[in-house]
Amino acid sequence: MSVTTDKTPQKSGAAGAAQFAGWDSRKYNYFEPKGRKASHYEDMTVDVQPDPKRYLLQDWIISFADGTPTYDERWTAAKSSDWHKFRAIDQEWERTHYQRQSTIVGMISNVIENGRRSGAPKRFDKAWIKILSDHLGAYKHAEFGLGTATMQAQRYGYTQMINNAILTNSSYKLRFSQDITLYLGELALDIEGIDLEAGKHHWLEDPIWQGTRHATEAVMGATDFLEQYFATNIVFEPLVAELFRSGFVMQLAAAQNDFMTPAVVSAAEGDYERNLANAVDLFNILVMDPNHGNENRKLFVHWFEKHGTLALQAAHQLQPIWSQPRVKVAQFSDALDVQKNRTRAIAAEIGFDIRATLDA
Amino acid sequence: MPEGLSLNKIIAQKGMSISEATARVADLGWTPSYVQEAMTFPTDYKIKKTPRDPMKQVLRSYFPMQEEKDNRVYGALDAALRGDMFRNVQPRWVEWMKLFLAIIPFPEISASRSMAMVARLAPGEELRTGFAMQMVDEFRHSTIQMNLKKWYMENYIDPAGFDITEAAFGKCYASTIGRQFAEGFVTGDAITAANVYLTVVAETAFTNTLFVAMPSEAARNGDYALPTVFLSVQSDESRHIGNGHSLLMSTINDPDNHLLLERDLKYAFWQNHAIVDAAIGTFVEYGTTDRDKKKESYAELWHRWIYEDYYRTYMLPLEKYGIKIHHDDVAAAWDRIVKKNYVHLTAQFFSVGWSVNFWRIEAQTEKDFEWFEHKYPGWYAQFGEYWKWYAKLSEKGQTQILFNGDVGYSYPHRCWSCMVPCLIREDFTYDTVDGKVYTYCSEQCRWTHKVAFAAEYEGRATPAMGRFSGRREWEECYHGWDIADAITDLGFVRPDGKTLVPQPHLHFDDAKMWTLDDVRGYKLGSPLTGFRALTDEERVTAAAEYRKGFTINPCN
């Protein structure tokens, strides 16, 4: 047994220890960055989900029984000349996602722990406690429904960037639905009058919430993943979710001696700003698409009509809640106007017209 | 401070029990009545029983726990740089990471996507949080691995191959097997893919060799980064194993599912073996410079993790539910590793085709020979001459080993099922499916393509089962091409436009590095195209000849 091998004379495996062809090629070089230089998010994300139109030499190698490949552009009615153009505005990859989620968890935990320690829940107005039980308790199911809808949707997108943006959206919604659940459970440890079963009862039975449940289930039941993402962020969030979170809870809670609930709910508002930015950018790219822009614009008008009609109906059905707090500091009509304007601004930024539905 | 008093005692307040918290969270779901959810990813299984959540964790505790794990990982990467890790790292090892880390982020994110499929299928919402955590975990794994790869690219002596990583992943003949792995998680019958293939077999069994055995070898080669990242990744796997087992338990009690479960356990075990053992076995055995005879070989690791830990303690107990376990396949896989040299033949194949890789492969040396012979008696007789040839022909100016007729190597057929070539020649087989001839590495892989991935299984309609598709034989993509043109098309050329990304040695010196001109003049061919062109009789003869194998000529 013998062999003579010229053992490498290299003493160090560190960058720069030798100079030869390619020794300084130290950037991922297979995609066009959105900006002048690739962001860390882009390096972590772009092209991880392959595409036969880019580098997938052998095409998808497993298909569904009907021949549909592992990923298919036809899984949405929207069309794109380049699905790879989209980059999530919030630039989330795993580390930033955990940092942000963990920070939110810490913020909410501190508010609840310190609020409870100071006896704050005992000073909540009695009528408000019932509102939290019945209506915040009901609303948590809407958040959960959107979380499951986006969890489903993150399977279908044609690029890693789209799917990961939808994935983090789902992660935020599911966390917030649990935030409310656990918050109410902890309030119930300190004060009487919190009925932890009431929320689901109202969600399933109360006419006030049936429009919201219908609108939520319409998102969950949509079979077009991009329609689910659109309906969540462009329709339901501004017209129903923000209406309840900002237009009701965050405006009225302080007047009922409750400083804790707005802090818990504010996390969702922060989450939504990021999800919205991602969604607006994606839908704007599709509206501006040189080959399919007009078609996509019509599609979004159609989606808005379908989900916007349900969302407006849901919003109006929530109106009685604004009459229930003992101290009334906000009007439903004002809150709805704010949210309609918000929705108009969102649609304008994307580049499609919602007047037919919103101002009908 | 009074004795026994602590900060925790001062700030402690009554909270919800974890079981109440998880019960409340599980109650977030409801049965829609206005709009029904479509079953968009079909399954032929019946799932009547609600899967239970064995982990009982809520997202409020999950996110801070993961952030803390991340902090440790990124802190360790910083420390490795401060400790000048790359000064002492073994390039032989890091080169193989160009392949491994090109492959693994896509299977990881595919696992994330697959959670959409099982979460909608599973009745009830008790396991929803488990699926959601796994979805985010896999997002973690995919991007943390992309980060590790970038870190290698920035700090290792030769970044070529890391810099083209995802493009290379889409084109390389070796990363195809990773795509088979990943697409298998998300395509076809949702339970077959996302439960049995992914969680019950890949994660429960084979992540041990992937994420535990391999990091140990990395550490032996001066690479402390890979263990840091991958042991952190592996710490998430126990939750995934729990998800998989829980969903398995919700299908296994229905005898109507047994036939499908037996099919899927057989397919999933064999294909995981064929893919993971080929790749990881090669990395562990051939990417190392550590030849301590006291350390476990891949075969010994396999016996510990797959045979003892998985087969005996996970698979065998399934028999009490009336499931037939394919003991013979477990034995056959073991035989392929210890008696039929599966890993060594794979390493030989990877190295013979070095010029279409996107990483460097160094020749094995005498020190390596001693270790291989010690761990795998008879190794030298079969592989010693080959590696001597490889060392000799690694010098620029020689005829590359793939086309050098003096060596005696015979290029293999590709297995249509696992996509690893048909390396164990005596097990080679072929069959006709839908009127076309296909080649396979083993009877089990033939069965997988022809019998398992079909519209009917043992008389039962299986409309949800997937199908094999695409240009599965890589060689067909470049049939008749000059190898230099193929390498250019693959993009495996360095920024100077001529020097190859792959090299058959670890010389970081332009004068010794192969260029396109050094390999030009030889044509690639598709073995399957040639095999299909034969008559039935000629194929019988050709197969018999193939099964006889080849002998490497002495290297003087």
Image: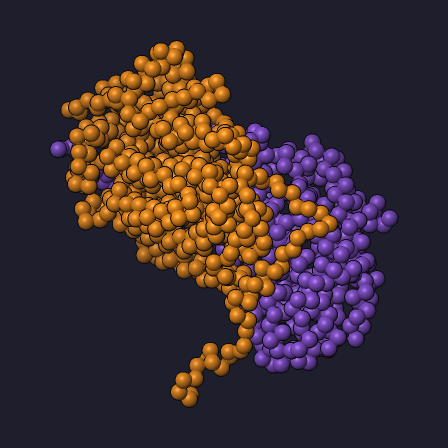
Chain colours: A purple, B orange
Q: Residue at x 32, y 48 (%)?
A: B312
Looking at the image, is B228 positioned above or below residue A54? below
Looking at the image, is A152 positioned above or below residue B490? below
Left or right of A174 in this view: B374:
left
Q: Is residue B92 visible?
A: no
Q: Is residue A185 visible?
A: yes
Left or right of A19 in this view: B416:
right
Percent of width and height locating residue B524: 38, 20
Looking at the image, is B123 positioned above or below residue B97? below
Which residue is more in the foreground, B313 or B228? Answer: B313
Extreme left residue here?
A1
Quadrant of residue B266 in the image? top left
Which residue is more in the foreground, A288 or B535? Answer: B535
Quadrant of residue A356 in the image? top right
Looking at the image, is B416 positioned above or below residue A325? above
Left or right of A152 in this view: B205:
left
Percent of width and height locating residue B450: 45, 27
Extreme bottom residue here?
B2
Quadrant of residue B368 in the image? top left
Percent of width and height locating residue A96: 52, 56
Q: Residue at x 42, y 43 (%)?
A: B323
Q: Residue at x 62, y 65 (%)?
A: A181
Q: Residue at x 47, y 25 (%)?
A: B471
Left or right of A105 in this view: B375:
left
